[in-house]
Image: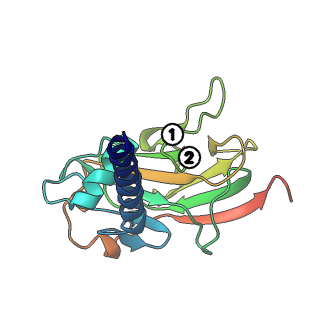
Amino acid sequence: MRSLILLFLALALALGLGGWSAQWALDKTSELGTEAVGPWLADPQAGSPDADPYTRAQLAHLGNLTLGSGEGIVFRAVTDQAGAPLRRECSYAVAGQTPPARVWTLAAFTLDGRLIQPGEGRPGWAVSGDLLRHDDNSFNVVTGPLAAAGNWLATTGSGPFVLALTLYDTPASSSSGVADLTMPTIVRNGCANG
């Protein structure tokens, strides 16, 4: 009986430490392979067969269906231009140009990858073809809890969030110079709680 208890104890310890070490490795390697363009981070190899095992494990853990190489690329931002974390109760101006793409979307997600639902009748994303633009083809999207004139991406709740800019059918997904791309800026306008 004693050996059976020791066996179960050893199995529980091995599974617990194994699970903890796997999660620790995923957390510590989350930036592996990513390239930064201002506050935007992208992993150009994420959807390719050349993706490293840690990237594949992170995508599987999140349940993320990543675009294949040549289909597109996802840029994520968790901070604004000043380096402050993005907060759902704050308003931000996402403005400028994107790299050439047939279509792109901008959406707000929770840190664990769930789309932030802005409420009934409002989509949780902005699509490039539906945006008002300036004469030079640049754009300005306000994201935040308070309605804004022009292009508005609503967020609800409080706490940190991730902005995801997904470029579809773009040469940027296969280029090795992701860090040299021109990306929109993210500037905080203010927060609902002061």
Q: Against 54, is 105 above or below?
A: above
Q: Amino acid at mark 1?
A: Arg
Q: How is the image coloured?
A: rainbow
List x then y, in percent, for residue 53.
22, 58
Crowding at label 2, few (<14), some or many (≥20) Cα neighbours within 10 Å? some
> Between 91 and 29, which is closer to the camera in this rendering?
29
State yes or no: discs 1 and 2 in contact (Cβ < 8 Å): yes
138 sits left or right of 13 in the view:
right
List x then y, in percent, for residue 76.
45, 58
Residue visible at 34% across and 55% down in the picture: 18
Residue 46 location, quadrant: bottom left
- Which quadrant is home to the C terminus? bottom right
List x then y, in percent, for residue 125.
51, 39
Residue visible at 38% across and 44% down in the picture: 2
Judge whether residue 140 can be spotted in this image: yes
Total numbered badges shown on the rendered structure: 2
Q: Which residue is mark 2?
A: 110
Judged from the image, the secondary structure of the residue bearing numbered disc 2 is loop
- Which quadrant is home to the N terminus? top left
Identity of the residue furthest to the top in this view: 120
Identity of the residue furthest to the right in this view: 194
Q: Amino acid at mark 2?
A: Thr
Q: Which residue is mark 1?
A: 114
